[in-house]
Amino acid sequence: MSSIIKIILFLLYLLTISFDIKYLKSIKRSEKIILLSLNLFVLSFMVMRYLYTDIPMPLDFFINHVSPWIHKWAHSEN
């Protein structure tokens, strides 16, 4: 994906967050925390993708570290 498209998507995301500001004033504190944490999570992924940083994924850890161990354990002669 080109950098221009990433920047456009980022700006659109910021626009949608700006629309949520009115909504944030009328919801409970716990809901605000959840909404803000989700937005931070999404923003961090967007920044990581823009900077071409690898995003850590649990499935990668399972495939690279746990799966070979289970394979050795399951196919052992003992």
Image (cartoon, rainbow, N blue to C red):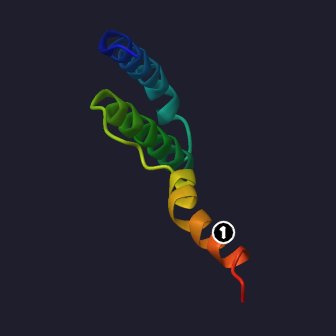
Residues 63 and 12: in front is: 63
Q: Position of residue 15 (x, y in %)?
A: 41, 16
Q: Position of residue 29 (x, y in %)?
A: 51, 50
Disc 1 secondary structure class = helix
Classify residue 75 as left or right of residue 2.
Answer: right
- Circle 1 sits on which residue? 71
Q: Position of residue 32 (x, y in %)?
A: 50, 44
Residues 58 and 15: in front is: 58
Task: Specify the quadrant of the image occupied by residue 7.
Answer: top left
Q: Which corner quadrant holds the C terminus? A: bottom right
Q: Position of residue 62 (x, y in %)?
A: 57, 60
Q: Is residue 62 above or below residue 7?
A: below
Classify residue 74 as left or right of residue 15.
Answer: right
Q: Circle 1: is it few (<14), some (14-19), or many (20+) Cα within 10 Å?
A: few
- Identify the residue shown where x is 53% and y is 47%: 34
Q: Which corner quadrant holds the N terminus? A: top left
- Identify the residue shown where x is 58% and y is 72%: 69
Q: Tell which residue pokes out farthest to the front in this image.
A: 77
- Identify the residue shown where x is 66% and y is 68%: 71
Classify residue 11 as left or right of residue 75.
Answer: left
Q: Amino acid at mark 1?
A: His
- Identify the residue shown where x is 39% and y is 34%: 43
Total labels: the figure holds: 1
